[in-house]
Image (cartoon, rainbow, N blue to C red):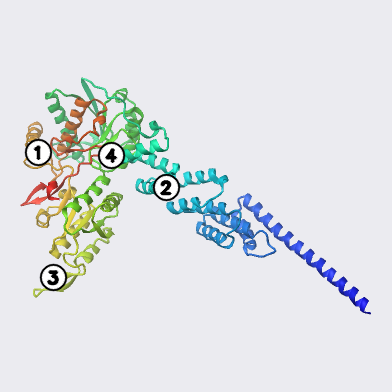
Amino acid sequence: MIRNLLIVFVTSTLVNCQLSRVNLVAAQTNYQQQYANAKSLFKEGKYNLAMESFKSLVAYDKENPFSEYASFYYALSAYHQGYKSVAKDMLLQIRQLYPNWDQLDEVNLWLARIHFDNKEYFQAMNQLGALKSQKFLKDIQSVKKAGLAPLTDIGTLTRLHEEYPKDAVVGERLASELSKNGTGKESQELLEKLVSTFKLKKAEYITGPPPSVYKDVYSVSVLFPFQVNTLEPTLSRKRNQNILDLYEGMKLAVDTLRKMGVNISLRAYDTDRNPEKIKSILDLKELMHTDLVVGPLFQEENDIVQEFSRKNKINLFNPLTNNFDLVRDNPYGFLYQPSLEALGEQSAIFLDGYLTNKTCMIFMGDTKRDSVLAMNFLKGAKETNLNITQIERFTKESSRKILEILATPTEFDEFKYPKQFTLPKDSLGAIFVASDDPLIYTKVVSSVTTRGDKVVILGSENWLDQTTDYEKLNSLGVVMFASNFTPPNNALYNAFLQKFIRTHGRTTSTLPYTDYAKIGYDFMFFAGTMLKKHGVYFQHEFNKAEIQGYLTEGYDFQYSRDNQHVPFIRFNAGELIRIPPSNR
């Protein structure tokens, strides 16, 4: 009886073990089949279905050998569908749950890609630094190159290079951007160091102009939208009078230069603000042999002319704009005016030397121009002792907030005039106003007038053409960056004015401040004398010293393709004066 029970027990145990083994095999087969199906969907690019299939395999189970891989491919499926935050969370979970998994290098590689996608460059570089296996070296380089390719900000690239001074990919990217957009002596010295350190092909990164060529007569081609077909034969002001004045000033300068023995053949072409018209002009054989192109003046005309200049190695100057983007990709393209970048940075340097109270606010409008100007002021301020306490962007609708920020009273005197404000008196040193919108800067002026303290307002010389309330600008001591400033007592300027009146029977400008004829005259005199002294590629001389001006103070193109000379002006007893460096 006992023997029979024993046989039954043993037999039952064997059967149960066999059933368990069968169930285990079946479970493993089931997991394996699920994983195989999910992997197949992933390979076919059906990432949504793959995510659902991998999801059931993600949870840890001691009988499931695929949880790590399922988690990994779940993350990749999410990534390929644009769910990068989901992918990132899953990859981080893998690292936490499976710290000894032999595929962690691939996890870190994908985390680095996600950081690059999110423009988290330092985190991405740190992530790549965590990879240990040598077999991923090519993948690391590939991910790094792809991730850094969209990064064009020289400041960020410079900080990356400082953090990873031996990284060749970072060094090459920084060199590439410096070769296209770097300005200033320090940028050029850094570029040369990068080329040497990382054995880069110098000709691809440091390209200078050809040797200069000297001539008896230099041809200057002016590409302006004269729109002659729309002009009426009357003495009244034309709608494009500024452009006509600019050209008339250039013509007068050519006449002055001729009397000095400098021969310029000035050729005018009407672009008519029409890209097709410009193409036909640039197809003319005479344009191929011109020594200097002046223009174009508008964005829609720009690309094709810049390409012509770059391809044919012909110097090009834009005499009016502050937008460096118009010439950025053309090594033969120059701005006669300072760029917005230069105006912003040098305004910060100026205020640092001008102020006792270094506390400063930045107010800007909602245009791209305002943003570039404000951000470069902030960039410059970081290199000084200025303390930026507030940055505000205003639209026309929200500009009333300026009064709330600056002139909301908290206390009144016996005559009910405000004597204290939410922003306490004398707590603020300056306001940098990065906008030419009268709704913005007039409210700043009005608010500071109400406050009655010594806040310095720094803005643009363009304000002088948009306001007639010079008395407020005078009483508040408003400062303006002014690359086109000419002192009223400049004898050469007064001689130019008399010459213009004799020639045209009228004064040069109907605007209160900006004189386009003067700008044209001064630019052409600068270009003509440079051509005479230094030949067609006169930029060879730019890095040697600043250049003396004629009607304006001068020009500084040292290691730059825009004029870095930025004077600052204010009213003194009702007369505009330049603020000398000793007073800053």
Residue tagged by mark 4? 185
Task: Report if the CB atoms under discs 4 and 3 are less than 8 Å apart.
Answer: no
Residue tagged by mark 1? 507
Residue 103, image x and y in percent? 60, 53
Q: Which element type, helix, strand or loop, lies under badge 3?
A: strand
- Rounded to the nearest whole Å, what is the CA distance between mark 4 and mark 1? 41 Å
Q: Quadrant of residue 281?
A: top left
Disc sitting over residue 228 in the figure: none
Disc sitting over residue 419 in the figure: 3
Q: Nearer the viewer, mark 2 or mark 4?
A: 2
- Rounded to the nearest whole Å, what is the CA distance between mark 2 and mark 1? 60 Å
Amino acid type for the residue under numbered disc 1: Thr
Q: Nearer the viewer, mark 4 or mark 1?
A: 4
- Tell me if residue 269 can be seen: no
- Which one is earlier in the sequence, the residue at label 2 or at label 1? 2
- Tell me if residue 395 can be seen: yes
- Rounded to the nearest whole Å, what is the CA distance between mark 2 and mark 4? 23 Å
Residue 422, image x and y in percent? 21, 69
Q: Which quadrant would the N terminus be assigned to in this image?
A: bottom right
Residue tagged by mark 2? 164
Residue 554, image x and y in percent? 17, 38
Q: Nearer the viewer, mark 3 or mark 1?
A: 3
Q: Is residue 548 above or below residue 12?
A: above
Q: Residue at left 76%, top 62%? A: 26
Packing grade of label 1 (10 A; few <14, some 14-19, many >=20) is some
Amino acid type for the residue under numbered disc 2: Tyr
